[in-house]
Image: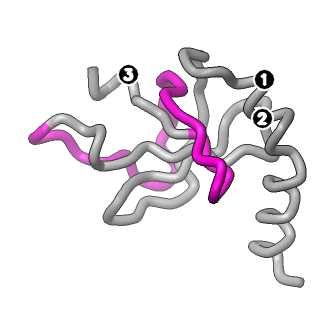
Amino acid sequence: MDWYQERARRIEAAWGETVAGLPIGTRVTGVVIEARPFGSFVELDGWPEVLGLAKVSQMPHGMVLPARGERVAGEVYWHTDHNHQVLLRLDAWT
């Protein structure tokens, strides 16, 4: 099993704890670990088994997605059970 599959397994195993510990409205900080055309994946501080996603669909017109390595802050606005992601609305976008 490669590192990606292992991380996905750990994220899935921790999903119940993630949803309970990071309810909608929770303030979070973290570091962008990957930027894609549809959004930026964020590793959340204090939550190693969580994958945050700042989706481009939540970004105001004229803004730019944060790049890999950039520190961000924001708020949890949804949990996607099918792929175990915590959706984020970034402070820079409000």
Q: Who is closer to the viewer here, 23 or 90?
A: 23
Residue 66 image point, x, y percent: 37, 46
Quarter of the rendering containing residue 79:
top right
Tell me where the magenta segment starts and ends, as one range.
61-86
Secondary element under disc 2, as helix, strand or loop, is: helix
Question: Relative to 31, is 75 above or below?
Answer: above
> Which residue is disc 2 drawn over?
18
Quarter of the rendering containing residue 46:
top right
Secondary element under disc 1, as helix, strand or loop, is: helix
Residue 38 image point, x, y percent: 35, 60
Three-letter amino acid code at the position of disc 1:
Gly
> Which residue is disc 1 drawn over?
21
* Label 3 vs label 2, nearer the camera: 2
Three-letter amino acid code at the position of disc 2:
Thr
> Which residue is disc 3 drawn over?
91
Query: What residue sits 48% from the left and 55% below the top?
Result: 68
Q: Tell whether position 66 is magenta.
A: yes
Q: Residue furthest bottom?
A: 1
Residue 92 image point, x, y percent: 32, 26
Looking at the image, residue 73 sits to the left or right of residue 46; the answer is: left
